[in-house]
Amino acid sequence: MVKSAAIRKLYEPYEIKSIQFKNRITMAPMVPFGVPGGEENSLGEDVLDYYRERIKGDLGLVVTHCFSVLEQDVGLRAFGLNNEKQKADLKKLVDMCHGNGTKIIVQIGYPSKGHHRHEKINSWTAEQLHHIEDLFVESARAVKEQGADGIELHGANMFFLNLFSSPISNTRTDEYGGNLEGRLHLAGNIIRRIKEFSDDDFIIGYRLGFNKNVRTDIDTAAALEKTGVELLHVSYGIREADRYLAPDYPPVITYPGSSRAKIEGPESFDFNDVVFTGTSVHTFVNIPVILVDEIWNLSRGEELLNKNAGEFIAYGRPFLGDPDFLEQSKENPQYEGCLRCKACAWFHDYSKCPKVIRRKKENIGKF
Ligand SMILES: Cc1cc2nc3c(=O)[nH]c(=O)nc-3n(C[C@H](O)[C@H](O)[C@H](O)COP(=O)(O)O)c2cc1C
Ligand code: SF4
Protein backbone atom coordinates (compact mmCIF):
# COMPACT_ATOMS: atom_id res chain seq x y z
CA MET A 1 0.00 0.00 0.00
CA VAL A 2 1.37 3.46 -0.91
CA LYS A 3 1.98 5.61 2.13
CA SER A 4 2.10 9.37 2.53
CA ALA A 5 5.55 10.80 2.05
CA ALA A 6 7.27 11.50 5.37
CA ILE A 7 4.49 9.95 7.41
CA ARG A 8 5.90 7.00 9.30
CA LYS A 9 4.87 6.96 12.93
CA LEU A 10 1.17 7.19 12.14
CA TYR A 11 1.49 3.99 10.14
CA GLU A 12 3.27 2.04 12.84
CA PRO A 13 1.27 -0.85 14.29
CA TYR A 14 0.29 -0.91 17.96
CA GLU A 15 -0.94 -3.53 20.36
CA ILE A 16 -3.24 -3.33 23.37
CA LYS A 17 -3.79 -6.64 25.13
CA SER A 18 -4.16 -9.15 22.27
CA ILE A 19 -5.55 -6.56 19.84
CA GLN A 20 -3.27 -5.55 16.98
CA PHE A 21 -3.89 -2.15 15.41
CA LYS A 22 -2.51 -1.82 11.91
CA ASN A 23 -1.67 1.81 12.55
CA ARG A 24 -2.47 4.80 14.78
CA ILE A 25 -4.97 6.58 12.53
CA THR A 26 -8.33 6.90 14.24
CA MET A 27 -11.71 8.22 13.20
CA ALA A 28 -13.13 10.23 16.10
CA PRO A 29 -16.60 9.51 17.48
CA MET A 30 -19.19 11.54 15.61
CA VAL A 31 -22.96 11.31 15.65
CA PRO A 32 -24.05 11.71 12.03
CA PHE A 33 -26.86 14.12 12.92
CA GLY A 34 -29.37 14.34 10.12
CA VAL A 35 -28.55 11.00 8.54
CA PRO A 36 -31.77 9.01 8.91
CA GLY A 37 -31.65 6.14 11.40
CA GLY A 38 -33.29 2.73 11.23
CA GLU A 39 -36.29 1.16 12.93
CA GLU A 40 -36.47 0.86 16.70
CA ASN A 41 -33.67 3.39 17.18
CA SER A 42 -31.18 1.16 15.37
CA LEU A 43 -28.48 2.42 13.01
CA GLY A 44 -30.31 1.50 9.83
CA GLU A 45 -28.95 1.34 6.30
CA ASP A 46 -28.20 5.05 5.84
CA VAL A 47 -26.01 5.34 8.92
CA LEU A 48 -24.27 2.11 7.91
CA ASP A 49 -23.68 3.65 4.47
CA TYR A 50 -22.26 6.78 6.12
CA TYR A 51 -19.74 4.55 7.87
CA ARG A 52 -19.17 2.36 4.79
CA GLU A 53 -17.99 5.43 2.86
CA ARG A 54 -15.35 6.15 5.52
CA ILE A 55 -14.22 2.75 6.78
CA LYS A 56 -11.72 1.79 4.16
CA GLY A 57 -8.05 1.85 3.25
CA ASP A 58 -5.63 2.83 5.96
CA LEU A 59 -8.07 3.58 8.75
CA GLY A 60 -6.69 1.80 11.83
CA LEU A 61 -9.41 2.46 14.40
CA VAL A 62 -12.93 3.79 14.56
CA VAL A 63 -14.30 5.07 17.81
CA THR A 64 -18.00 5.08 17.02
CA HIS A 65 -20.39 7.93 17.72
CA CYS A 66 -21.94 7.78 21.15
CA PHE A 67 -24.51 5.03 21.56
CA SER A 68 -27.05 5.47 24.31
CA VAL A 69 -27.19 3.04 27.19
CA LEU A 70 -30.95 3.60 26.99
CA GLU A 71 -32.88 1.73 24.35
CA GLN A 72 -34.86 4.81 23.35
CA ASP A 73 -33.57 8.11 22.08
CA VAL A 74 -34.38 10.84 24.59
CA GLY A 75 -34.08 13.86 22.39
CA LEU A 76 -30.39 13.98 21.60
CA ARG A 77 -29.50 11.85 18.62
CA ALA A 78 -28.44 8.65 20.32
CA PHE A 79 -28.87 5.19 18.86
CA GLY A 80 -29.37 2.30 21.27
CA LEU A 81 -27.60 -1.04 21.38
CA ASN A 82 -29.89 -3.16 23.46
CA ASN A 83 -32.78 -4.51 21.39
CA GLU A 84 -32.32 -7.18 18.71
CA LYS A 85 -32.46 -4.78 15.75
CA GLN A 86 -29.98 -2.42 17.43
CA LYS A 87 -27.61 -5.30 18.14
CA ALA A 88 -27.91 -6.70 14.62
CA ASP A 89 -26.98 -3.34 13.09
CA LEU A 90 -24.06 -2.88 15.45
CA LYS A 91 -22.85 -6.32 14.40
CA LYS A 92 -22.99 -5.18 10.75
CA LEU A 93 -20.84 -2.18 11.67
CA VAL A 94 -18.35 -4.37 13.54
CA ASP A 95 -18.09 -6.75 10.58
CA MET A 96 -17.65 -3.82 8.20
CA CYS A 97 -14.67 -2.58 10.24
CA HIS A 98 -13.09 -5.98 10.66
CA GLY A 99 -13.50 -6.66 6.93
CA ASN A 100 -11.14 -3.73 6.38
CA GLY A 101 -8.73 -4.68 9.17
CA THR A 102 -9.97 -1.64 11.13
CA LYS A 103 -10.54 -1.99 14.87
CA ILE A 104 -13.75 -0.70 16.40
CA ILE A 105 -14.31 0.73 19.85
CA VAL A 106 -17.90 1.59 20.62
CA GLN A 107 -18.57 4.74 22.60
CA ILE A 108 -21.36 4.51 25.15
CA GLY A 109 -22.91 7.25 27.20
CA TYR A 110 -25.92 8.26 29.18
CA PRO A 111 -27.72 10.94 27.21
CA SER A 112 -30.09 13.44 28.67
CA LYS A 113 -31.58 16.55 27.24
CA GLY A 114 -30.10 18.60 30.04
CA HIS A 115 -26.58 17.27 29.75
CA HIS A 116 -25.13 20.76 29.96
CA ARG A 117 -26.87 21.50 33.23
CA HIS A 118 -24.58 20.92 36.15
CA GLU A 119 -27.21 20.80 38.85
CA LYS A 120 -28.87 17.80 37.28
CA ILE A 121 -26.31 15.23 38.32
CA ASN A 122 -26.41 16.49 41.87
CA SER A 123 -30.04 15.55 42.34
CA TRP A 124 -29.91 11.90 41.24
CA THR A 125 -30.55 9.44 44.06
CA ALA A 126 -28.18 6.56 44.79
CA GLU A 127 -30.92 4.20 43.60
CA GLN A 128 -31.16 5.98 40.24
CA LEU A 129 -27.38 5.87 39.90
CA HIS A 130 -27.33 2.11 40.58
CA HIS A 131 -29.78 1.72 37.73
CA ILE A 132 -27.65 3.84 35.39
CA GLU A 133 -24.59 1.83 36.41
CA ASP A 134 -26.45 -1.36 35.40
CA LEU A 135 -27.37 0.22 32.05
CA PHE A 136 -23.71 0.99 31.29
CA VAL A 137 -22.60 -2.51 32.24
CA GLU A 138 -25.30 -4.22 30.18
CA SER A 139 -24.56 -2.00 27.18
CA ALA A 140 -20.86 -2.85 27.40
CA ARG A 141 -21.80 -6.53 27.49
CA ALA A 142 -23.95 -6.06 24.37
CA VAL A 143 -21.02 -4.36 22.62
CA LYS A 144 -18.72 -7.25 23.49
CA GLU A 145 -21.27 -9.79 22.30
CA GLN A 146 -21.32 -8.16 18.87
CA GLY A 147 -17.58 -8.71 18.52
CA ALA A 148 -16.30 -5.13 18.90
CA ASP A 149 -12.75 -4.58 20.14
CA GLY A 150 -13.76 -2.50 23.12
CA ILE A 151 -15.92 0.20 24.60
CA GLU A 152 -15.23 3.83 25.33
CA LEU A 153 -17.09 5.35 28.27
CA HIS A 154 -18.09 8.87 27.29
CA GLY A 155 -16.66 10.96 30.11
CA ALA A 156 -16.01 14.11 28.08
CA ASN A 157 -17.80 16.97 26.33
CA MET A 158 -19.94 17.77 29.39
CA PHE A 159 -21.72 14.47 29.14
CA PHE A 160 -22.93 12.56 32.14
CA LEU A 161 -19.68 11.01 33.43
CA ASN A 162 -17.79 14.25 32.74
CA LEU A 163 -20.24 16.11 34.95
CA PHE A 164 -19.62 13.55 37.68
CA SER A 165 -15.82 13.67 37.43
CA SER A 166 -15.55 17.45 37.61
CA PRO A 167 -15.46 19.33 40.93
CA ILE A 168 -17.03 22.28 39.11
CA SER A 169 -20.23 20.41 38.27
CA ASN A 170 -20.26 17.71 40.95
CA THR A 171 -21.13 19.30 44.29
CA ARG A 172 -22.46 16.14 45.89
CA THR A 173 -21.50 15.34 49.45
CA ASP A 174 -22.35 11.62 49.41
CA GLU A 175 -20.19 8.73 48.14
CA TYR A 176 -20.61 10.02 44.54
CA GLY A 177 -18.83 13.29 45.23
CA GLY A 178 -16.73 15.13 47.77
CA ASN A 179 -13.29 14.24 46.44
CA LEU A 180 -11.67 12.63 43.41
CA GLU A 181 -12.47 9.15 44.61
CA GLY A 182 -16.12 10.09 45.11
CA ARG A 183 -16.40 11.86 41.78
CA LEU A 184 -15.11 8.70 40.07
CA HIS A 185 -17.16 6.34 42.22
CA LEU A 186 -19.79 5.77 39.55
CA ALA A 187 -17.27 5.40 36.71
CA GLY A 188 -15.15 3.14 38.91
CA ASN A 189 -18.08 0.83 39.66
CA ILE A 190 -18.89 0.63 35.96
CA ILE A 191 -15.29 -0.06 34.98
CA ARG A 192 -14.78 -2.73 37.63
CA ARG A 193 -17.95 -4.55 36.61
CA ILE A 194 -17.07 -4.44 32.90
CA LYS A 195 -13.63 -5.76 33.75
CA GLU A 196 -15.24 -8.90 35.17
CA PHE A 197 -16.28 -10.04 31.70
CA SER A 198 -13.80 -8.28 29.43
CA ASP A 199 -10.98 -10.57 28.45
CA ASP A 200 -7.76 -10.14 26.51
CA ASP A 201 -9.53 -9.07 23.35
CA PHE A 202 -11.78 -6.39 24.79
CA ILE A 203 -10.46 -2.93 25.66
CA ILE A 204 -11.94 -0.62 28.28
CA GLY A 205 -11.49 2.92 27.03
CA TYR A 206 -12.52 6.25 28.54
CA ARG A 207 -13.00 9.63 26.87
CA LEU A 208 -11.89 12.17 29.41
CA GLY A 209 -12.90 15.82 29.29
CA PHE A 210 -11.61 18.92 31.10
CA ASN A 211 -12.50 18.70 34.77
CA LYS A 212 -11.13 21.80 36.48
CA ASN A 213 -7.57 22.31 35.30
CA VAL A 214 -4.72 20.26 33.88
CA ARG A 215 -3.71 19.06 37.33
CA THR A 216 -7.24 17.67 37.99
CA ASP A 217 -7.27 16.06 34.56
CA ILE A 218 -3.95 14.32 35.23
CA ASP A 219 -5.15 13.13 38.64
CA THR A 220 -8.40 11.91 37.10
CA ALA A 221 -6.56 10.07 34.34
CA ALA A 222 -4.18 8.42 36.82
CA ALA A 223 -7.11 7.31 38.99
CA LEU A 224 -8.93 5.90 35.97
CA GLU A 225 -5.83 3.96 34.97
CA LYS A 226 -5.65 2.51 38.47
CA THR A 227 -9.27 1.44 38.25
CA GLY A 228 -8.65 -0.49 35.04
CA VAL A 229 -9.00 1.86 32.07
CA GLU A 230 -6.75 0.62 29.26
CA LEU A 231 -7.02 3.40 26.69
CA LEU A 232 -7.62 7.11 27.25
CA HIS A 233 -9.01 9.56 24.75
CA VAL A 234 -8.78 13.20 25.77
CA SER A 235 -11.38 15.62 24.46
CA TYR A 236 -12.89 18.90 25.63
CA GLY A 237 -15.01 19.04 28.75
CA ILE A 238 -16.44 21.36 31.34
CA ARG A 239 -16.64 24.81 29.81
CA GLU A 240 -15.51 26.70 32.91
CA ALA A 241 -12.33 24.64 33.39
CA ASP A 242 -8.85 26.16 33.04
CA ARG A 243 -7.54 24.95 29.73
CA TYR A 244 -3.86 25.40 30.32
CA LEU A 245 -1.81 25.52 33.46
CA ALA A 246 -3.21 25.82 36.92
CA PRO A 247 -1.41 28.62 38.80
CA ASP A 248 0.33 26.14 41.08
CA TYR A 249 1.44 23.94 38.28
CA PRO A 250 4.95 23.84 36.81
CA PRO A 251 5.45 24.50 33.10
CA VAL A 252 4.96 21.45 30.98
CA ILE A 253 8.48 21.26 29.70
CA THR A 254 9.75 20.58 33.22
CA TYR A 255 7.05 18.17 34.31
CA PRO A 256 8.43 16.27 37.28
CA GLY A 257 8.57 12.54 36.79
CA SER A 258 7.87 12.85 33.10
CA SER A 259 9.20 9.87 31.28
CA ARG A 260 7.07 9.91 28.17
CA ALA A 261 6.31 13.26 26.62
CA LYS A 262 8.65 15.88 25.30
CA ILE A 263 6.22 18.69 24.82
CA GLU A 264 6.64 22.40 25.03
CA GLY A 265 4.65 24.97 26.96
CA PRO A 266 1.49 26.57 25.63
CA GLU A 267 3.23 29.63 24.10
CA SER A 268 5.11 27.56 21.56
CA PHE A 269 2.70 24.66 21.41
CA ASP A 270 1.04 24.79 18.02
CA PHE A 271 -2.01 22.74 19.03
CA ASN A 272 -5.13 23.62 20.96
CA ASP A 273 -6.09 23.24 24.61
CA VAL A 274 -7.58 19.78 24.07
CA VAL A 275 -4.40 18.39 22.57
CA PHE A 276 -2.43 20.18 25.24
CA THR A 277 -4.43 18.44 27.97
CA GLY A 278 -4.06 15.13 26.15
CA THR A 279 -0.28 15.39 25.96
CA SER A 280 -0.09 16.54 29.58
CA VAL A 281 -2.16 13.59 30.75
CA HIS A 282 -0.05 11.28 28.59
CA THR A 283 3.03 12.30 30.53
CA PHE A 284 1.64 10.86 33.73
CA VAL A 285 -0.11 7.65 32.74
CA ASN A 286 1.23 4.35 31.48
CA ILE A 287 -1.69 3.51 29.22
CA PRO A 288 -2.00 4.65 25.59
CA VAL A 289 -3.63 8.00 24.81
CA ILE A 290 -5.63 9.08 21.78
CA LEU A 291 -5.12 12.75 20.90
CA VAL A 292 -7.83 14.64 19.03
CA ASP A 293 -9.18 18.07 18.09
CA GLU A 294 -8.07 20.37 15.32
CA ILE A 295 -5.16 18.17 14.35
CA TRP A 296 -6.56 18.51 10.83
CA ASN A 297 -3.96 16.67 8.75
CA LEU A 298 -1.55 13.74 8.84
CA SER A 299 1.53 15.99 9.03
CA ARG A 300 0.39 17.52 12.29
CA GLY A 301 -0.58 14.12 13.68
CA GLU A 302 2.86 12.78 12.76
CA GLU A 303 4.46 15.75 14.49
CA LEU A 304 2.64 14.88 17.73
CA LEU A 305 3.69 11.24 17.57
CA ASN A 306 7.27 12.32 16.89
CA LYS A 307 7.09 14.41 20.06
CA ASN A 308 5.94 11.25 21.85
CA ALA A 309 2.82 13.15 22.87
CA GLY A 310 0.37 10.24 22.49
CA GLU A 311 -0.11 6.87 20.81
CA PHE A 312 -3.11 7.41 18.50
CA ILE A 313 -4.27 10.42 16.51
CA ALA A 314 -7.99 10.87 15.92
CA TYR A 315 -9.55 12.97 13.17
CA GLY A 316 -13.18 14.02 13.21
CA ARG A 317 -14.28 16.68 10.75
CA PRO A 318 -11.63 15.72 8.15
CA PHE A 319 -13.51 12.41 7.79
CA LEU A 320 -16.88 14.16 7.66
CA GLY A 321 -15.79 16.61 5.00
CA ASP A 322 -14.06 13.99 2.90
CA PRO A 323 -14.61 10.24 3.24
CA ASP A 324 -11.47 9.92 1.06
CA PHE A 325 -9.40 11.96 3.51
CA LEU A 326 -6.76 9.26 3.97
CA GLU A 327 -6.51 8.37 0.29
CA GLN A 328 -6.04 12.06 -0.59
CA SER A 329 -3.44 12.44 2.16
CA LYS A 330 -1.14 9.91 0.51
CA GLU A 331 -0.11 12.46 -2.07
CA ASN A 332 -0.23 15.39 0.28
CA PRO A 333 0.04 14.77 4.04
CA GLN A 334 -1.06 18.35 4.65
CA TYR A 335 -4.39 17.66 2.99
CA GLU A 336 -7.23 18.55 5.38
CA GLY A 337 -10.47 17.13 4.04
CA CYS A 338 -12.39 19.82 5.91
CA LEU A 339 -12.68 23.56 5.35
CA ARG A 340 -12.64 24.43 9.06
CA CYS A 341 -15.99 26.26 8.96
CA LYS A 342 -16.75 28.36 12.03
CA ALA A 343 -19.75 26.15 12.81
CA CYS A 344 -19.74 22.62 11.46
CA ALA A 345 -22.91 21.89 9.48
CA TRP A 346 -22.75 18.23 10.45
CA PHE A 347 -24.11 19.15 13.89
CA HIS A 348 -27.43 20.09 12.29
CA ASP A 349 -27.70 19.25 8.64
CA TYR A 350 -24.85 17.50 6.89
CA SER A 351 -26.24 18.40 3.47
CA LYS A 352 -25.15 22.03 4.16
CA CYS A 353 -21.49 21.02 4.51
CA PRO A 354 -19.70 22.71 1.58
CA LYS A 355 -17.65 19.57 0.99
CA VAL A 356 -20.82 17.47 0.80
CA ILE A 357 -22.39 19.99 -1.57
CA ARG A 358 -19.38 19.71 -3.83
CA ARG A 359 -19.50 15.90 -3.76
CA LYS A 360 -23.22 15.93 -4.57
CA LYS A 361 -22.53 18.11 -7.62
CA GLU A 362 -19.88 15.67 -8.75
CA ASN A 363 -22.17 12.75 -7.96
CA ILE A 364 -19.73 11.16 -5.55
CA GLY A 365 -21.07 9.06 -2.67
CA LYS A 366 -24.15 9.51 -0.53
CA PHE A 367 -22.97 11.23 2.63
C1 LIG B 1 -21.00 16.22 14.03
C2 LIG B 1 -20.17 15.85 15.20
C3 LIG B 1 -20.64 14.88 16.08
C4 LIG B 1 -19.87 14.53 17.20
N1 LIG B 1 -20.32 13.51 18.01
C5 LIG B 1 -19.54 13.09 19.05
C6 LIG B 1 -19.90 11.95 19.82
O1 LIG B 1 -20.87 11.23 19.56
N2 LIG B 1 -19.10 11.63 20.87
C7 LIG B 1 -17.97 12.35 21.18
O2 LIG B 1 -17.28 12.04 22.15
N3 LIG B 1 -17.59 13.41 20.42
C8 LIG B 1 -18.32 13.77 19.35
N4 LIG B 1 -17.87 14.79 18.55
C9 LIG B 1 -16.54 15.40 18.78
C10 LIG B 1 -15.48 14.71 17.91
O3 LIG B 1 -15.26 13.37 18.34
C11 LIG B 1 -14.11 15.43 17.96
O4 LIG B 1 -13.63 15.42 19.27
C12 LIG B 1 -14.21 16.87 17.46
O5 LIG B 1 -14.89 16.93 16.23
C13 LIG B 1 -12.81 17.49 17.31
O6 LIG B 1 -12.03 16.78 16.39
P1 LIG B 1 -11.76 17.37 14.89
O7 LIG B 1 -11.17 18.74 15.08
O8 LIG B 1 -10.79 16.41 14.26
O9 LIG B 1 -13.09 17.44 14.21
C14 LIG B 1 -18.63 15.15 17.43
C15 LIG B 1 -18.16 16.11 16.52
C16 LIG B 1 -18.91 16.44 15.41
C17 LIG B 1 -18.34 17.44 14.42
S1 SF4 C 1 -19.30 21.67 7.51
FE1 SF4 C 1 -17.31 22.70 7.32
S2 SF4 C 1 -16.30 22.17 9.28
FE2 SF4 C 1 -17.96 20.67 9.02
S3 SF4 C 1 -17.02 18.94 7.94
FE3 SF4 C 1 -17.93 20.29 6.39
S4 SF4 C 1 -16.20 21.54 5.73
FE4 SF4 C 1 -15.64 20.69 7.71
Image (cartoon, rainbow, N blue to C red):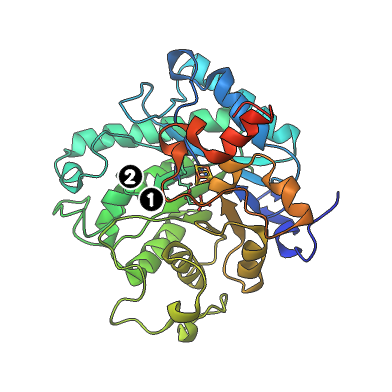
**Residue 159, labelled with which disc?**
2
Residue 199 showing in the rendered view: no
Which of these two is toward me, 5 or 182?
5
Extreme-front residue of the structure: 361
Which of these two is toward me, 253 or 363?
363
- The reply to whether the C-beta atoms of the residues labelled 2 and 1 are less than 8 Å apart is yes
State whether residue 349 is above or below residue 23: above
Queried on whether the Cβ of the residue with tag 1 lies below 8 angstroms from ligand 1, the answer reads yes
Extreme-top residue of the structure: 39
**Residue 89, labelled with which disc?**
none
Residue 251, image x, y percentages: 41, 84
State whether residue 173 is above or below residue 134: below
User: Hey, which quadrant is residue 360 in on the image?
Assistant: top right
Residue 308, image x, y percentages: 61, 72
Q: Secondary structure at mark 2?
A: loop
State whether residue 243 is above or below residue 201: below
Packing grade of label 1 (10 A; few <14, some 14-19, many >=20) is many
Queried on whether the Cβ of the residue with tag 2 lies below 8 angstroms from ligand 1, the answer reads yes
The total of numbered circles placed on residues is 2
| Residue type at the position of mark 2 | Phe
Extreme-bottom residue of the structure: 254
Task: Identify the residue at image location x=40%, y=34%.
Answer: 348
Which of these two is toward me, 292 or 297?
297
Q: Which residue is mark 1?
A: 156
Task: Identify the residue at image location x=74%, y=57%.
Answer: 332
Q: Secondary structure at mark 1?
A: loop
Residue 156, image x, y percentages: 38, 50
Residue 287, image x, y percentages: 55, 61
Q: CA distance from mark 2 to mark 1?
A: 6 Å
| 229 left or right, relative to 244 | right
| Residue type at the position of mark 1 | Ala
| 352 left or right, relative to 111 | right
